[in-house]
Amino acid sequence: MSMAAEERSLRAPWVLTVPALMLFVGVLLIPLAMTVMLSFHDWGQYKGIEPVFILKNWHEIATDPYYAEMFWRTFRIAILTTLLTAVLGAPEAYILNRMSGRWKSFFLLVILGPLLISVVARTLGWALLFGGNNGLVNKLLMSLGVMRSPIPFMFTETGMIIALAHVMMPFMVLSVWAALQRLDPQIENAAMSLGAGPATIIRRIIMPQILPGVLSGAIIVFSLSASAFATPAIIGGRRLKVAATLAYDEFLNTLNWPLGAAVATLLLVALVLIVVGSNALIERRYAEVFR
Amino acid sequence: MSRNGPLALIFHTVFVIVMVAPILVVCLVAFTPEGFLSLPTNGFSLRWFRTIANYPEFIHAFWVSLGLGALSSLVALLFAVPAALAIARYRFRGRDALAALFLSPLMIPHVVLGIAFLRFFTSAGLGGTFAALIVAHVIIVFPFALRLTLAAATGMDRTVEMAAVSLGAGGWTLFRRVTLPLILPGVISGWALAFIQSFDDLTMTVFLAAPGTETLPVRMFLYIQDNIDPLVTSVSACVIAITMTALILLDRIYGLDRVLAGKGDTGR
């Protein structure tokens, strides 16, 4: 390579990425830094935001049990949603993978399609299905004899978890599906020819191999559920607050921006730590799978 | 490979019904002839679709969403295509860090982005403007635009480019006549997926939209907060129909499994 060409190939990647880099520094990193700074500012009903450095908001979040309860609720809902998607999504991905070509792609479209349909519309669907004591879900469960009296779904954590699990399910199916694609079907046949029953095959052959897929799906579902806004806001109503809906309230109703910024910063830091930490754990534990 | 047993098929049927039920119920209730929320038991009616015409704020919000989605996806591509070419072709210092930065909007909760942009644009004197919405949406759709363009650029046959170079093509001509046509399916799919993401976003936009720049999801959300009636189901049914059309087009052009394959994959 000539000197000039070599110099060009050294410079070219930077020339091509600099516009995007400037965009990201200018309107992503700076606003995020401003939000972190905002969380240290003071606020008062009449004086508004005062650009001083105090720990008032952080102190309030750390000491007021209201925030501990709210964050615990947020993460509890996210954990249960993740469990629900894993328990139902993993077997479904396995069943899908065993279907023949045309059915497989049809049902994959049916299950993954909702991913792109408006979250507001999907949650509205659950609000209609739950709708009060004589909602369709309650009618169905009672006619099946699952329970005697209707249970409330609207404005409860149960309803939030069901609706969130529905919204997040495609991510789990997709993730397990990707893990199943790496699996060699011959191993299953080999186990069968050596006399393993279906239960043994699932437990000893399939489960260990799709576990990384389930775990990486769980990370995605967990982080999206913990920061979900539309579903908790519509199903949970005005009283059952999670981190995202509380931050929304502080910003657009109470107008206490510094406190809202502190809640958002805490949510961001907690999620980044959890996601990066569990990613590192999974990759170390299953290093051979990711290679 | 063995087939699914009856138990597996029952599980599968119930699973699919539950996945489809909420979407189906919205579309069915939209056709109710009654003045309240109910399944259309005695005949279908289009009255609630006609009612939308009496609510100009929904129609205006639809146009805002459409323009916002189309423009922000286009702007995102203007930045993403060069970046994708650089990341796909060159091994340079900071390459991995750059790729991670460009995909980071996938990892940052949209509520945090909404707050950050609200703070940023308000102090810049642009609070609630359409321009602010465009910039914010460019950031959130960027990873989708980048990822599909990157996949196309990585899988591209570079011998065609070399042939063009040997015939004297260079710079802009090379890009416009050879490279771009080759990566075009990826670029178009990237645009479409970016558009859908922008069109669907509520969590971030709800912080930024002001009366006049409210998008359709924001308008629907604010309406649902007050009351749920058949009107909002008919609006939702329209949104679902539009998304389904885009989805089918995307599936035909590029294959939905390929579009979605990398979608939820954070950080790697």
Image (tube, coloured by chain):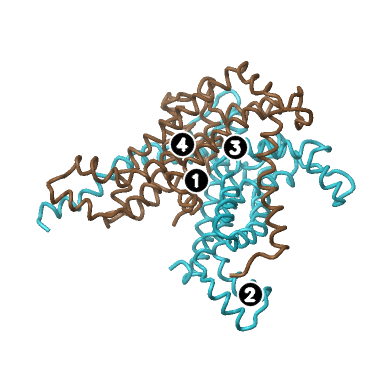
**Disc 1 chain ID:** B
Furthest residue toward bottom: A194
Q: Colour of chain B?
A: brown
Circle 3 SS class: helix
Q: Are marks 2 and 4 in contact (CB under 8 Å)?
A: no
Q: Residues within 10 Å of mark 1 (few under 14, many from 20)?
A: some
Three-letter amino acid code at disc 2?
Ile
Q: Are marks 4 and 1 on the same chain?
A: yes
CA–CA distance between discs 1 and 3? 15 Å
Secondary element at image label 4: helix
Residue A196 in view (yes/no): yes
Could you tell me which secondary element the residue under label 1 belongs to?
loop
Q: Which of marks 3 and 2 is nearer the N terminus?
A: 2
Q: In which quarter of the image is residue B194?
A: top left
Q: Which residue bears the numbered disc 4?
A: B195
| Near-viewer residue (B259 or B145) | B259
Residue bearing the label numbered 3? A247
